[in-house]
Image (cartoon, coloured by chain):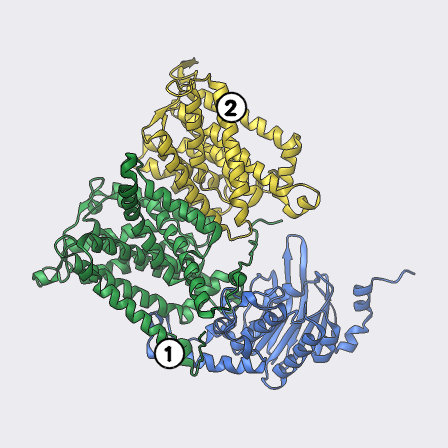
Amino acid sequence: MSLLEVENLSIHFGGLKAVDNVSFSVEEGEVFTIVGPNGAGKSTIFNLISRFYEATTGSIKFDGRDITKLGAEAIAPLGIARTFQNIELFDHSSVMQNLLVGRHCQRKTNFLAHAFFLPSVRREEIEHREKIEEVLEFLDLQAYREKMIAGLPYGVRKVVELARALASGPKLLLLDEPASGLSVEETQDMAFWIEDIQKDMGVSVLMVEHDMGLVSQVSDRVLAIDHGAMLAMGTTREVQSHPAVIEAYLGREED
Amino acid sequence: MQLLLSGLANGCIYGLLALGFVLIYKASEQLNFAQGDMMMFGAFLTITFVNNEWFGWPFLPGLLAAMVIMGTITYMMDKYLFRHIFGQPQFAMVILTIALGFVIRFVAGVIWGHEPTAINTPLAGKQVEFGGLVLGADDLSVIIVTFFLTIVLYLFFSRTKLGLAMQACSQNQLAAYYMGIPVKRVFSFVWALAGVLAAIAGVLFASKGTIDPASGLLGIKAFAAAVIGGFGSLPGALLGGLIVGIVEPFAARYLAPGFSQIAPYGIMIIVLIFAPNGLFAQMQNKKV
Amino acid sequence: MRFQFKTSYNDDINIFKNRYHVFWYALLGAGLFALPFVLGDYYVAQAIFILIFAIAGVGLMMLVGHTGLVSLGHAAFLAVGAYTTINLEKLGVPFLIALPLAGIFTGLFGAFIAIPVLRLIGIYLAIATMALSIIIEDIIVMAGPITGGVQGLSVDSIKLLGDWVSSDIFTVDLYASPYKFYFLCLFVAVLVTLLTINLLRSSTGRAFHAIRDSEVSARAMGINVARYKTLSFGISCFITGLAGGLLAHYLGHINHEAFLILTSIELLMILVIGGMGSVHGAFFGAFVFGMLPLTVTVLIETFGAPLGINSATFPGLSTGIFAAILVGFILFEPYGVNGMWLKIRTYFALFPLYRKDMFKRQKTYLKTERMR
């Protein structure tokens, strides 16, 4: 059984078919990438999986469970974490606080316990911090632990967002353009991290990315879409040489 | 019928005030909680020029002078105060205008005292008989002036250069800026226009009775009107004002005492819950 | 200069960050404890007023400063707390039980109101809460049996244990025993502050902050935004309700005029002057708000006498000045007194390395609500 199964997924905005009958599946321990020109519907698929949009038709199954009708806040506790194309961090909090929010779905205490700060809450807080320390170490963010997000450079914020997603201890990580706006070196770091996330942590990754270098380096399988419809699926090389994909990116050759 | 008419007249005043809110909101997405106090201040300025115990000018020049002064004050307010916090969260602007409202109210109290004051208008106390109905000339004049103003505003926005520039700014600030429209100055003019409208509304309000510094709280009712009409729509604001104005006297007559006070807000909350963008939200993208 | 080295996770979690921190707060505590023995009754009454508004401020701060939801109607909840306390006491419930009950009732009432109202965003929320405040004001007038209508209710002195133990030790009255009233308010203020800090350093508070900064992201992290907004509203109203109960006894006689929309606005102004998004801010703001009328009166009596003006010459002067100060703060120091305090503290902590642009503001251009 696949970790994530997307079947015949469609969403229409008015007359526009943003995603049209898309099916794919992500296997356990796999890095699966969706590529396509701007406006092809890649981010829309992400927003459908993380339940920000209602699917018009089709179904999404995670770990054998149908999540098509769940609320957006019910997704993270199942073990799906995501990043955003335009970084959505909590600007007025420190890196530590941001990662602690990432641990939100792992909490076991309620607000009454919090109000009196019972010993169980303290134990939980320490536990959160131990887990976060592992993530900070893994992504080399120790130096930024107490820094406010508002003062951090773009590249670091991108990594902090990845860290926040990892802090929740996910089974599946959705990365929306993890390398956009990063320098060549930062992109390379990102590639290594994604490989490590897959190999060492055993987390599956579903990614949207434009940088074909990064895509070919880390992806096990690639899905190309355009105008919301599937064009080709396979290894990076197969997809890149597929005539329909070339046509979508470069346009039809004039006869 | 008489109820309807006096409600209509009140509604016109609310509508004019709401128009001021919406103008500013549409142009710059700023909320002006001081609109009611601006109205009160404009009315007192007119009283200063017109009433016999002060300058005792004829009515129209006095009103014009008050309008000009109000416009200048609000223009300056935008230029020297609000521009400072441009780009800060919307909430800052809300608090700032509320605080300014307090200051305006205080200043008015110092200058003119806290006694309710009436205004000398040429129409005061006169009545018009129309098909068996006795109508107060003040009520009638309010309705006529509002109607007239609406046409003037419409022409202003569709025919004059400044009006078109305001429309452009409200639709897309950046694009307007690239087209060479001095966006900041246009904002200041929008504020000036709102100030002028506030002065007119104030005079109309004062002509129907008396005015004192606390009358600025009327602005809250106009807020309800703007929300009912949908915050982004000028015609909606007027209609919202009329709805509030008409509902009030009827609620006072047919419901238990006390309900007429809260009826407008009750309607507003119901509208907010069921149509969070106001009744006329679909007009949002049409005009300024 | 001083560095803070964290050697265990507890350093990160504890309320007091280091020994200096503990020392200063101990000193503050001692000062507050000694206050009624040093100052006259008049000033103690003033201090009580400040404490009550600080409590209400802490409550409103939970909502506005920490969750990012603007309420222009908190006087309504102050009223609910006040009338609930008084009516419970009239039924013979001792104050020590009536006050928390009133707080809980206000909290539940607030949460109930919140469910439809919190679907609104930004300005619409502010306007809806404002309307709520006005409606409650009128309901107070109409609901005669509970509220005494326009005449209002006169409030007896507090009997902490009600009629169970009718000893004078447990009777608290603003005029007969102001210091007892002071300690009661101080106790509630400390309790409420501790509760707030505890919430803020656990996942509930972080969820509030997350909602304030990015709702989309908060939802993606598994935070049930609607539920946490309601929770924040409820907690905020709970605290405000407690303040309302104390306020009723402070005023001695309450009617709708104690809970006007102006009170709601003043509460919000307290937060802005004090400094948004910090617990300190509520106290700083309440202090400024409480001390200003007194200061203005003293200044006028001192300097105005030769000019023939006294405090009656300009009614509403202190409100006007308060608003003018507020305008200044918004333009030049948006984090209020707390912001100034932080700057001064940093200046001395880093001396001589402080740079002027250290606290320079980042402009945050609002994301428009309009569809373009």
**Chain letter, colour blue:** A
| Residue assigned mark 2 | B64
**Residue in view at x 19 percent, y 60 percent:** C38
The chain containing the residue under callout 2 comes to B
**Residue in view at x 41 percent, y 68 percent:** C204
Q: Position of residue A21 (x, y in %)?
A: 67, 65
**Residue in view at x 54 percent, y 38 percent:** B23
Residue A61 appears left or right of A236? left
Q: Nearer the viewer, residue C147 or A71?
A: C147
Q: Nearer the viewer, residue C51 or C368?
A: C51
- SS assignment at label 1: helix
Mark 1 burial class by Cα count in 10 Å: few <14, some 14-19, many 20+: some
Mark 2 burial class by Cα count in 10 Å: few <14, some 14-19, many 20+: some
Residue C69 versus residue A132 in the image, above or below: above
CA–CA distance between discs 2 and 1? 69 Å
- Chain C palette colour: green
**Chain letter, colour yellow:** B
| Residue assigned mark 1 | A122
The answer to whether residue C140 is visible is no
